[in-house]
Amino acid sequence: MEEERDLVVFQDDEGNEITMEVLDYFFYEGKEYGILTEDLGDDAQDEEEVDPRECYIMEIVPVGEDEEEFVPVPEDLAEKLIELVESGAFADDEEFEDDEEE
C-alpha cells in the first residue's frame, strides 16, 4: 500500500506555486519544525534510487484552530538543526533541548 505524502504549497515572490513535501517533523526547544524538500510528484523514482534533494528546515507556527504556517528559520539555527538531524538525534521522536546555556 502506498504511503500518503504530506505536501505543502508555497507561493514565491512572482506568484509561482512551489509544492514541497514534508519529510519529517520534530521538536526542538519547545518548537515544532519540519524537514521539507521539493516535491518530484509522479517523476519520483523508488525511494532507494532517488538522488539526494536539497532539504529545508522550517518552523511550524500554529495560525488559527486548524491551520499552521511554515516559517523559515535563521541561518545559524538552520545549520544547528541540520547537524542534529544528520546525526540522528531526532530518531527517537523525542523533544531535544539545547545543551548550551545562553
Image: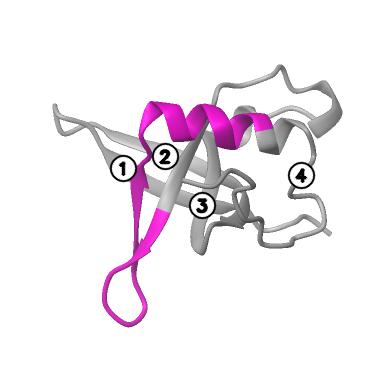
The span picked out in magenta is 60-83
Residues under numbered marks 1 and 2 in contact, where contact means CB atoms less than 8 Å apart? yes
Where disc 4 sits, the SS reads loop
Q: CA distance from mark 1 to mark 2?
A: 6 Å
Residues under numbered marks 2 and 4 in contact, where contact means CB atoms less than 8 Å apart? no
Q: CA distance from mark 2 to mark 3?
A: 18 Å
Where disc 1 sits, the SS reads strand
Residues under numbered marks 3 and 4 in contact, where contact means CB atoms less than 8 Å apart? no
Question: Residue at 42% across / 39% down in the picture?
Answer: 19
Residue on which the image places disc 2: 19
Quarter containing the N terminus: bottom right
Question: Residue at 43% across / 28% down in the picture?
Answer: 76
Residues under numbered marks 1 and 3 in contact, where contact means CB atoms less than 8 Å apart? no
Q: Which mark is residue 66?
A: none
Where disc 2 sits, the SS reads strand
Residue on which the image places disc 3: 33
Reading the chain from its start, which is encountered first: label 2 or label 3? 2
Q: Which mark is residue 10?
A: 1
Label 3 amino acid?
A: Tyr
Label 4 amino acid?
A: Ala
Determine the residue located farthest toward the left in the rendered image.
14
Residue on which the image places disc 4: 89
Q: CA distance from mark 3 to mark 4?
A: 14 Å
Reading the chain from its start, which is encountered first: label 2 or label 4? 2
Label 1 amino acid?
A: Phe
Where disc 3 sits, the SS reads strand
90, above or below 13, in the image: below
Visible residue check, residue 40: no
